[in-house]
Image: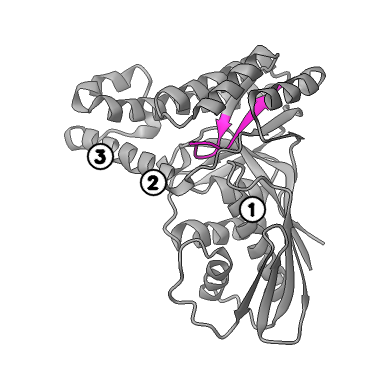
Amino acid sequence: MISKAPARVCLFGDHQDYLGLPVIACAINKYIVVEGVPNNTNHLIFNLTDLGQIVEINLDEDFSSLKKGDHIRHVIKTLKNNNININKGYDIKISSDIFINAGISSSSAFTVALTSFFIKIFDSKISSEELVAELAYQSEVVDQGGSGGRMDQYSISIGNTIFLETKSAFSFKKINNPIKNFIIANSGVKKQTDLILKNLKNKTINAVNTIKLKNPSFNLNKASIKGIYEYENQLSKTSFNYIKAAVENHSITQAAYLEMTKKIPNFNNIGELMNRHHDILKNDLSITVPLIDEMIDSALKNGAYGAKIIGSGGGGSILILSNEKDQNKLINAMYSAGAKEVVKANVSVGIFSL
């Protein structure tokens, strides 16, 4: 059995999914591969080829109390809790060409691929993209107390490009993405994903709750850019910036969806919306670092339609939208600015098995 899951990029809506606001995200053609054969034992033996590690798990272990970040055991625990009985040993090799800790969801791709792998083997009759996504979300976010939302697991599982509603009654729409020429540039600056997400999530939710104390009917999903200023005197400057950023990014995401679904989308408009989104992430949420700023500036000077940081921030990668003729020039510009790794990327299907 071989299971493959792609990386993902958030086109619009970073730091929105944990607030119940929509995002536009797509899977890209960088993959993690989980391949395994039965070993006639009661052990799962994982060969993590890129990390040079071997992990051996006895299926009779106690999975009730696990450390955060132990993604393999958390997947097994979540599947067991959902009546998917993993009762046979396998030798499993895991390899990947996804940048690690760089904002394109290497850990979520791993969780999705492993979840799909086990479901296909042990309960294939219930397998679906949505089920894999939800169980991966339960394992990575709910069971481990992660700070993100459903964007990563759903965009990776479903694949292609989706407009994902992330509030409690969530849903998604597939988009026939007109964007065919991505560049992903990894700064090489390692980020503290969960710390950044937790900090911004808690502060923004606290700001929403502060507003609701005096205005119980306040709804972040329905707030307007103009209307948000009536609450400015109820919050600290920082808290107001977080609320304003959420409302403005919500508006940008909606505008991007309308542009991307036109019969003939305007790439200059999409790029400008991307640049506006990045400016908010940089100036209101303060999630960039100097090298990221230099890379963004260089991309725009060298012909990009738009560019933005992707992922939680504090380092990681940027996404560049360009026409095909400028790609090589932009790649060279990224290396000159100090990027560690730069690749061309395209939209990909979601999880699949061989």
Q: Residue 198 has which mark?
A: 2
Q: Secondary structure at mark 3?
A: helix
Answer whether residue 317 is magenta in the image: yes
Around disc 2, counting alpha carbons within 10 Å, would you say few (fewer than 14), some (14 to 19), or many (20 or more)? some
Q: Could you tell whether 212 is left or right of 127 in the image?
A: left
Amino acid beneath label 1: Ala
Around disc 3, counting alpha carbons within 10 Å, would you say few (fewer than 14), some (14 to 19), or many (20 or more)? some
Q: Secondary structure at mark 1?
A: helix
The answer for how far apart the CA atoms under marks 3 and 1 are is 33 Å
Around disc 1, counting alpha carbons within 10 Å, would you say few (fewer than 14), some (14 to 19), or many (20 or more)? many
Amino acid beneath label 3: Asn
Residue found farthest to the left: 214
Classify 151 as above or below 182: below
**Picture residue at 47% right of the left edge, 45% below the top:** 192
Among the two numbered marks 3 and 2 on one chain, the one whose residue lies closer to the N terminus: 2
Depth check: 283 or 132 in front? 283
The answer for how far apart the CA atoms under marks 2 and 1 are is 21 Å
The answer for how far apart the CA atoms under marks 3 and 2 are is 16 Å
Q: Are marks 3 and 1 in contact (CB under 8 Å)?
A: no
Please report the bounds of the magenta region as a residue range. Answer: 309-322
Classify 270 as above or below 39: above
Residue on which the image places disc 1:
109
What quarter of the picture does the N terminus occupy? bottom right
Picture quadrant where residue 353 is located: bottom right
Q: Could you tell whether 349 is left or right of 111 in the image?
A: right
Q: Secondary structure at mark 2?
A: helix
Q: Residue 209 has which mark?
A: 3
- Residue 2 is situated, as x and y percent measured from the top left of the image, at 78, 64
